[in-house]
Image (cartoon, helix red, strand yellow):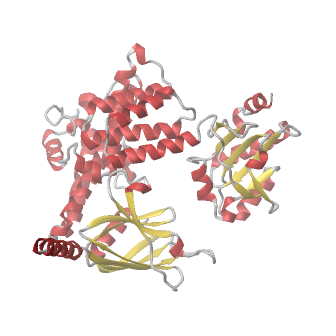
């Protein structure tokens, strides 16, 4: 009995300690914007805790949703956290970075009406979050420091470029000094230091490619010309030609980041940096006669093999996962090679969260490959009549997804009208889907380009995100071709201007 009471007491004390570690955080605010009458901010907003580096997968994130509030266009969050943690405030497709600490109590005004929309915080925790808003969200202050100089890269001497890098390092360090006295900010300061360091490394690579593009096209790697390899070979580097030694050493000393799991957890720029690194190594692989095949499958094999050799730990898990996920987005047919790479990735027993993300993307990919049953959707056409893709079975279906704010889309709308004439009275269902948000723009283009047949503006039914996700719409225009049995031929079919008639005629036989 005493033993039981002792264990129970320990459990109660332990539970009390855990609960005591968690402290409340409050974030409330209002959205200033010309929102539709039926639009409720509380239905479209959430706060997301990034649990790990695979934050693109919902299964690897923790979401908090607002409490009910009767004030229009407002939101109110209240939840508990144990330590200072990075978060994202998500409003539809808009993402705003947050850094919340226990006992923070914040109010924010999100102003989307001004040309330079912004976020302004007040209350406990406002300083760091206003800094984040200025750096990453507010349009009038979140410009990339290199953006104004990129057009001058070809004319810029290496020494001038490295002076630019040095000045940016100093400016960023000075900004972060504002929070240096606060111990709770040390992890965040390290994170930002890594981010701008890798951003600078990426920019150095862009600068060098601008100068040595012809050599790269000839299959040469940047090699000793690039300071880019500090991170991978800190002991074996050469000073770029034309750069002052002392200045170069000063920059090199200031950028102190390495390949490690901590960076993998915290820095998006880090992986962009490693993507560039693999791209630079690719020519030496492709120079081998055995690997001359430039198809996506073989390029994927090369990248995958290189990443397996070059990286270890979580960095390796993420890089291999990124390569596979990018392939899923680009490949429209399932192949034994992709299946074998997936089997290999599973056999490596990568980080669970990373594997979950890749498995999710793989399943999405299998749903849209050639031969898969086309996902059904229901829509109201231009006459308000309800239609569905399933009802078109027995016909070849060709879907053109465009928008009036995209120049290439306008060209395809013109070609679409010609295609309609060619396929008139044939067993083909043409569907023109516009991702415009305003009905007036849609109707204007339909009239201008004399588009006939079925038409759909998903925005009228608030279905644009749902449709884009269903068919993985990544760029506009995008065309989808479906056979008479309702099976996908391609989700990235030829455009009307690219001679798609031949492919359609083939399916009609």
x then y, percent, for residue 281: 33, 28
Q: Name the side, left or right, on which 301 lies relative to 332.
A: left
Quadrant of residue 385 within the rendered picture: bottom right
In what quadrant of the picture does the N terminus appear? bottom left
- Residue placed at 37% from the left, 27% from the top? 282
x then y, percent, for residue 448: 79, 53
Total label count? 0
Q: Is 207 in front, or is 376?
A: 376
In what quadrant of the picture does the C terminus appear? top right
Considering every residue shown, the one lying at the far bottom of the view is: 70
x then y, percent, for residue 371: 64, 34
Above or below 252: residue 95: below
x then y, percent, for residue 89: 41, 67
Q: Is 97 in front, or is 332?
A: 332
Quadrant of residue 349 within the rendered picture: top left
Is residue 211 in view from this perspective? no
- Residue placed at 76% from the left, 43% from the top? 416
Q: Is 319 in front, or is 20?
A: 20
Considering every residue shown, the one lying at the far right of the view is: 425
Is residue 114 in view from this perspective? yes
Q: Is 241 in front, or is 47?
A: 47
Q: Name the side, left or right, on which 498 lies relative to 103.
A: right
Considering every residue shown, the one lying at the far front of the view is: 1
Q: Name the side, left or right, on which 173 lies relative to 474.
A: left
- Residue placed at 38% from the left, 40% from the top? 321
- Residue placed at 53% from the left, 41% from the top? 365
């Amino acid at each position: 009995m005493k033993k039981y009471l002792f264990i129970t007491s320990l459990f109660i004390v332990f539970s009390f300690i855990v609960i005591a570690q968690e402290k409340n955080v409050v974030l409330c605010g209002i959205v200033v914007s010309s929102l539709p009458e039926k639009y409720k901010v509380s239905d479209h907003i959430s706060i997301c805790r990034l649990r790990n580096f695979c934050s693109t997968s919902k299964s690897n994130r923790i979401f908090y949703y607002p409490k009910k509030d009767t004030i229009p266009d407002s939101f109110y969050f209240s939840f508990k956290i144990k330590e200072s943690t990075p978060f994202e405030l998500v409003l539809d497709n808009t993402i705003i970075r947050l850094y919340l600490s226990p006992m923070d109590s914040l109010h924010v005004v999100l102003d989307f009406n001004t040309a330079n929309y912004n976020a302004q915080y007040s209350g406990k925790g406002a300083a760091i979050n206003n800094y984040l808003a200025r750096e990453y969200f507010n349009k009038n202050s979140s410009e990339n420091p290199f953006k104004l100089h990129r057009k001058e890269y070809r004319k810029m001497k290496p020494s001038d470029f490295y002076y630019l890098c040095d000045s940016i390092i100093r400016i960023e360090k000075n900004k972060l000094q504002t929070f240096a006295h606060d111990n709770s900010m040390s992890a965040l300061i390290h994170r930002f230091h890594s981010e701008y360091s890798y951003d600078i490394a990426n920019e150095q690579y862009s600068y060098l490619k601008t100068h040595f593009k012809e050599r790269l096209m000839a299959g040469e790697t940047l090699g000793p010309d690039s300071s880019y390899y500090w991170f991978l070979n800190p002991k074996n580097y050469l000073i770029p030609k034309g750069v002052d030694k002392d200045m170069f050493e000063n920059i090199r000393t200031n950028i102190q980041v390495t390949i490690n799991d901590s960076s993998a957890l915290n820095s998006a720029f880090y992986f962009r940096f490693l993507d560039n690194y693999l791209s630079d190594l690719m020519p030496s692989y492709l120079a081998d006669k055995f690997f001359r095949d430039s198809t996506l499958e073989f390029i994927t094999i090369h990248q995958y093999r290189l990443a397996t050799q070059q990286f270890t730990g979580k960095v390796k898990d993420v890089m291999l996962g990124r390569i596979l996920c990018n392939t899923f987005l680009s490949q429209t047919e399932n192949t034994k090679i992709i299946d074998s790479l997936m089997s290999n990735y599973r056999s490596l027993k990568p980080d669970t969260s990373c594997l979950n993300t890749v498995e999710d993307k793989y399943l999405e990919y299998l749903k849209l490959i050639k031969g898969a049953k086309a996902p059904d959707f229901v829509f109201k056409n231009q006459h308000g009549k309800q239609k569905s893709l399933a009802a078109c079975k027995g016909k070849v279906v060709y879907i053109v997804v465009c928008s009036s704010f995209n120049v290439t889309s306008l060209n395809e709308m013109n070609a679409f009208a010609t295609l309609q004439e060619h396929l008139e009275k044939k067993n083909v269902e043409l569907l023109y889907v516009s991702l415009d948000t305003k009905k007036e723009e849609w109707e204007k283009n339909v009239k201008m380009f004399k588009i006939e047949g079925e038409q759909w503006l998903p925005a009228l039914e608030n279905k644009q995100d749902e449709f884009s996700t269903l068919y993985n719409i990544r760029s506009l225009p995008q065309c989808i071709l479906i056979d008479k049995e309702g099976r996908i031929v391609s989700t990235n079919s030829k455009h009307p201007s690219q001679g798609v008639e031949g492919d359609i005629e083939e399916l009609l036989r």
